[in-house]
Amino acid sequence: MLAHIVTDETFQHNVFDASFFGPIVVVLHAGENDPSATYVDDLAEAIGDHGLDYTLVSIDAEQNPQATAVFGIQIAPSTKGVLNGVLRAEITGPEPRAAIDAFLTALPLTQAEQALATNDEALLRAALAADPLEPTMTIALGRLLLDRGDTLEAHFVLMTVGHHPIGAGLFERSRVLSNPDSDPELAGCLAHYTTDLTASLDGMVALVDASDEQRLDTIRRIFIGIFAERPADDPLVLTYRQRLAATQF
């Protein structure tokens, strides 16, 4: 296995952009005369032995200061593992084969990470089977079911995340939509949530001042969940925070 030579000019394309198509193993060495430059051969051998579909690249740290600065290299050789634009594993200095093997094993997405990255229902369910109370996976599966219209199953799935701001909002949506007769007006607003979010939020804002404490608490949880999912300066968050400030919210 040959390592691709990467420079400052090709770094973005051949490392970070390419990492969205598979793991990239980056070896940074201190020039062609650096004895540790041969460390790339050890990595190539390990990748081949494991039968991994990884891309191996080599960067001369002395000649490519921009790439070196991205990783903050201080010791050569330094080995970095990048996947989906994220640094996932690293080795500083030459290491024995056992450390290289551990590094290569740490690069791929875990089952849970892959489930979240793809939002694949089967993977989410498998991850939850392994860790039934994991909140991030529970919320992801609950949202998928809720958006698909499987409100009753979503309601049961989301029962364990009522303490979580985002989970609580999703749980309240599932509770109302799985039993719309419990609050037909609020259920009517939430029915349009996935197809016309603005209309759904406008409808809930209009209900606030006429709501009893139970409904008001439900609306609060839903809005808090929405706000928790978005940056504080998101236009939707700013708009509805301002509108809700003029109510008894």
Image (tube, grey):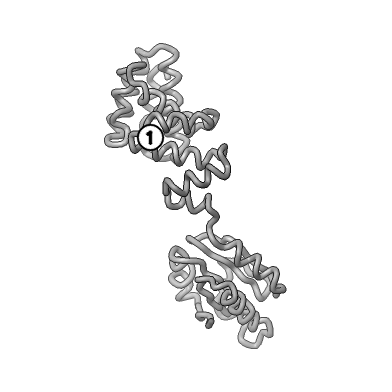
Q: Quadrant of the C terminus?
A: top left
Q: Nearer the viewer, residue 43 or 5?
A: 43
Indicate left or right for 81 with 100 as reference.
left
Question: Residue drawn at (48%, 29%), measured in percent from left and top?
Answer: 168
Badge 1 local density, few (<14 within 10 Å), some, or many (20+)?
many
Instruction: Residue under label 1, please give it.
Output: 146
| Residue found 45% across the figure and 40% down from its top | 141
Question: Label 1 sits on what residue type?
Answer: Leu
Where in the figure is residue 21, as x and y percent of width and height?
Answer: 43, 65
- Is residue 232 visible to the viewer in this orientation of the structure? no
Q: Residue at x 38, y 20 (%)?
A: 246
Q: Is residue 196 left or right of residue 58?
A: left
| Marker count (numbered) | 1
Q: Is residue 2 above or below residue 101?
A: below
The outermost residue toward the bottom is: 33
Q: Nearer the viewer, residue 8 or 130?
A: 130
Question: Which percent across, then down, holds residue 238?
Answer: 39, 34
Give x and y (percent) for residue 4.
50, 80
Residue 114 screen position, x and y as percent: 49, 53
State which quadrant residue 107 falls in. bottom right
Q: Is residue 36 above or below residue 123?
A: below
Whether residue 64 is visible to the viewer of this picture, yes or no, is yes
Q: What secondary structure is found at the residue carrying circle 1?
A: helix
Asked if residue 34 is positioned above or below residue 147 in the image, the reply reads below
Q: Nearer the viewer, residue 240 or 91?
A: 91
